[in-house]
Amino acid sequence: MPAKILQFISRREQVRQRGARNYARWMRITKGLEPYGPKERHRIFQQQAEEERKDRAWAIRHAPGPGSAVILAFSEQDERSTVGA
């Protein structure tokens, strides 16, 4: 059985794609290209609620824990100046 390679999609890209999808849907609805009846409205609200649940779960999994360390980012220039010291 051949291996199936999954592409990594960052959280930032996931949120960007969701925003683009929601904006495109909004444009289709406002231009009258997509129906927006009670069934569609209910489906969209359910989808938004599911996305909010997923966002909360992600935030809990990735939030810093109590007593956790903080990683500081340094620029390359700072690294080069301390190498010779």
Image (tube, rainbow, N blue to C red):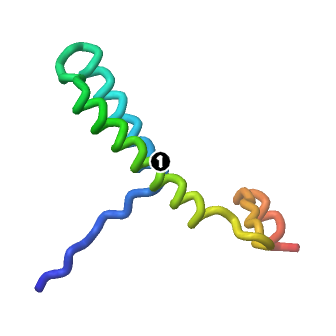
Q: Which residue: 25% across, 72% down?
A: 5
Taking depth in this image into account, of 82 and 33 the one nearest to the observer is 33
Rendered location of residue 56, percent (x, y): 54, 55
Quarter of image, res 78: bottom right
Pick the quarter of the image with the N terminus.
bottom left
Amino acid residing under circle 1: Glu
Q: Which residue is mark 1?
A: 52
Rendered location of residue 37, percent (x, y): 22, 24
- Residue 32, compared with residue 62, is above or below; it is above
Rendered location of residue 32, percent (x, y): 20, 14
Q: Which residue: 52% across, 60% down?
A: 58
Q: Which residue: 29% across, 29% down?
A: 25
Q: Is residue 9 left or right of residue 4?
A: right
Q: Judge the density around disc 1: few (<14), some (14-19), many (≥20) Cα neighbours within 10 Å.
A: few
- Residue 62, compared with residue 19, is above or below; it is below
Rendered location of residue 41, percent (x, y): 30, 30
Tally the marks: 1
- Residue 24, compared with residue 6, is above or below; it is above
Quarter of image, res 71: bottom right
- Residue 20, compared with residue 85, is above or below; it is above
Specify the farthest residue to the left: 1
Taking depth in this image into account, of 46 and 27 the one nearest to the observer is 46
Pick the quarter of the image with the C terminus.
bottom right
Mark 1 residue element: helix
Q: Which residue: 70% across, 59% down?
A: 76
Q: Is residue 62 left or right of residue 43?
A: right
